[in-house]
Each structure stands twice: as C-alpha cells, then as structure tokens.
Image (cartoon, helix red, strand yellow):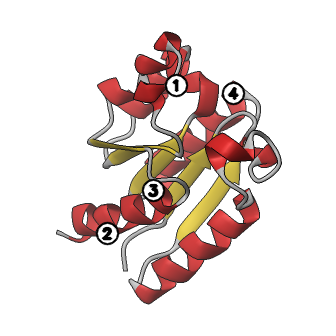
C-alpha cells in the first residue's frame, strides 16, 4: 500500500454547504471527507484530510506530506491566486500534486483565472463540484501506484 494521500483544503472550505451553495453546492466538507475516505478504502489507499484558514498550517501539512505522503490533492481556495509560499512548499514535495476547484474558476472573476498552484500541479480539476475530489483521487491512485 502507498503512503497516505494528503487532501488539503484552504480558507473558507470549512463553510462548504453553507457559503454560496449556488456556486459550491450543499455538501459539507465532512461529506467530502467521508466520500474520499470511502473511495480510498475501496481502492486500497489511505487519505489524510485537512482544512485550514491559515496559510502556514497548509504549508506545514505539505511539509508533513514530504515525509509521510505519496501524493497531495489540494483545493487551496483563495490561496490559489495569492500564495507563492504554498507554491514553494509544493515545489519541495517530490510526489504528484493535483489541484481541485469545486467551481469552474474560469467562468468567474478574472482574478480567479490565475493559479500559483497550477505552476506545480500535475493536473487541475475544476467545475465538477465536490465530485472533483473523487476524480482527483482516482487519478492519484494511477499516479502513485504506477
């Protein structure tokens, strides 16, 4: 079995299901974590699911993944567009990185079209709702087990 896949979530994702459900849907982050854990189990993988509104905590999780993880799936939230520090942490991670966005960021405000994380990501999934996490997990399985 591969080391755990880290699934990291940035600011305001703790409000998933309550904040702008017309954009992000009604599922909670706990629902997403449960679905990811179940799918990972079916695929013979383990996940470590984290959310923080603090950039440094996310960076610490990426650093932990350098030692203990085999891949990172990240929805950096608004840090997507602002955080060179998260990009630097991801650049220090040697495994695969997949970027996930619940909404289609390219149909939204222009400032959301730029992603620092995409400069490191091996793939980007956007606009598939919370199902994007499951799609990323399926792809991550291929990347870490091949």
Dot 4: element? helix
Q: Nearer the viewer, mark 1 or mark 2?
A: 1
> Which mark is first along the chain, 2 or 1?
1
**Residue 140: horizontal and vertical position, in percent?**
33, 61
> Which mark is first along the chain, 3 or 2?
3
Q: Nearer the viewer, mark 4 or mark 3?
A: 3
Please give the residue where the numbered disc 3 appears in the rendered image: 132
Residue 56 - label: 4
Please give the residue where the numbered disc 1 appears in the rendered image: 80
Residue 141 - label: 2
Q: Quadrant of the N terminus?
A: bottom left
Dot 3: element? helix
Whether pointer 3 and pointer 1 mark residues with C-beta atoms closer than 8 Å, the reply is no
Residue in the image at 55% along x and 70% along y: 36
**Residue 10: horizontal and vertical position, in percent?**
65, 37
Quadrant housing residue 55: top right
> Which mark is first along the chain, 1 or 3?
1
> Which mark is first along the chain, 1 or 4?
4
């Amino acid at each position: 079995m591969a080391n755990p896949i880290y699934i990291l979530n940035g600011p305001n994702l703790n409000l998933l299901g309550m904040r702008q459900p017309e954009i992000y849907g009604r599922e909670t982050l706990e629902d997403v974590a449960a679905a990811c854990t179940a799918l990972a189990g079916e695929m013979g993988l383990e996940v470590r699911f984290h959310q923080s509104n603090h950039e440094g905590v996310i960076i610490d999780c990426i650093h932990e993944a350098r030692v203990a993880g085999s891949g990172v799936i990240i929805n950096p939230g608004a840090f997507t567009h602002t955080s060179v520090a998260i990009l630097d942490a991801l650049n220090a991670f040697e495994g695969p990185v997949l970027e996930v966005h619940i909404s289609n960021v390219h149909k939204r405000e222009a400032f959301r079209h730029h992603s620092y994380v995409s400069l490191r990501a091996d793939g980007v999934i956007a606009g598939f709702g919370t199902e994007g996490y499951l799609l990323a997990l399926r792809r991550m399985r291929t990347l870490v087990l091949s």
